[in-house]
Structure formats: structure tokens, C-alpha cells
Amino acid sequence: MVGQVADSAELAERLRTVIGHLVRTVRTFDTLPTGEAAVLGYLNREGPRTAAELAERRGVRHQSVAKSVSELLDQGYVRTEPHPTDGRKQLVHLTARGLGRLDEERHRRADPLAAAIDTELTAAERRELARCVRLLDRLAARVRDAR
């Protein structure tokens, strides 16, 4: 199929398979549990949230996020404070220590990938990959918006 344009369904399946394999491969470098890393990532990107909001974003049960938040609190990666408009809720905040830990985890994933890009791809292929990343970002936004 190299050099030929696949139909959309076939291309979508090949893309899903390759991206899935890439994600599973880079996750082998993780040292932080997935749920905890996801909570830190959401807090970093979106700011303070309640556990219920984090659970909704992750598509998991509140209890799962509550357990992750508890572990992160114990490690000093997050802190909580009362919600400003609903005293029954707690807002979860990312701490500087948590941001540092998140950055470490991101580098564990990205560094081996960057090394592979440097050693495996030519300059022209790196430029092509950069264009592909922009296309993948557009596709991800479209699929996300279609939900």
C-alpha cells in the first residue's frame, strides 16, 4: 500500500493501529500510574478542578479519581482547598512539586521518541513528520468535536 492512497476507512484503521502501538510503546517508560498522570495532566492544562470534574473529563468513576487524588495528595503533587461557591466540594490544585513530577514523566516518554526521530529520520522526513503532526492535531480536534 506504500505510495497508494487508501480509502478513508482503511487509512483510519491503519492510523488507529499505528498510533495505538506508538502510545503503548512510549507508555512502557512510565513510572507514574496512568490515573495519577492523567489527573496531573488535566490540572496542568485546565487548572484547578473538582474530583467530579476530573472524573468526567477522564470518563471514569468518581471513586477512581478520588483514589488517584488521595495518592497525589500524599506525595505532595496536588493540594486541595474548599470550592469558592460550594463548600461541600474541594478544588484540586497542581503543586510545583506535582508539575515537576509531571514534567519528568513527560520527558520519560518524549526523550526516547526524540532520540528515535533524530537517528531514524532524515531532515526531510522530520519536516514531513512535523506536517503530519499538524494534520493529526486537526483530525483529533474534529473527532473530539464530533462527540
Image (tube, rainbow, N blue to C red):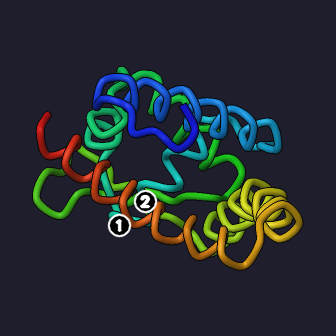
- In this rendering, the answer to whether 112 lies above or below 47 is above
Residue at disc 2, secondary structure: helix
Which residue was labeled with disc 1? 47
If the image is split into quadrants, where does the C terminus sit? top left
Amino acid bearing label 1: Gly
The x, y position of residue 104, in whole percent, is: 76, 64
The x, y position of residue 39, in whole percent, is: 49, 47
- In this rendering, the answer to whether 64 lies above or below 50 is above
- How crowded pointer 2 is (Cα within 10 Å; few <14, some 14-19, many 20+) is rated as many
- How crowded pointer 1 is (Cα within 10 Å; few <14, some 14-19, many 20+) is rated as few
- In this rendering, the answer to whether 99 lies above or below 3 is below
User: What residue is shown at x 72% (from left), y 79% (from top)?
Assistant: 123
User: What residue is shown at x 43% (from left), y 57% (from top)?
Assistant: 80
- Location of residue 65 (image quadrant): top left
If the image is split into quadrants, where does the N terminus sit? top right
Which residue was labeled with disc 2? 43
Residue at disc 1, secondary structure: loop
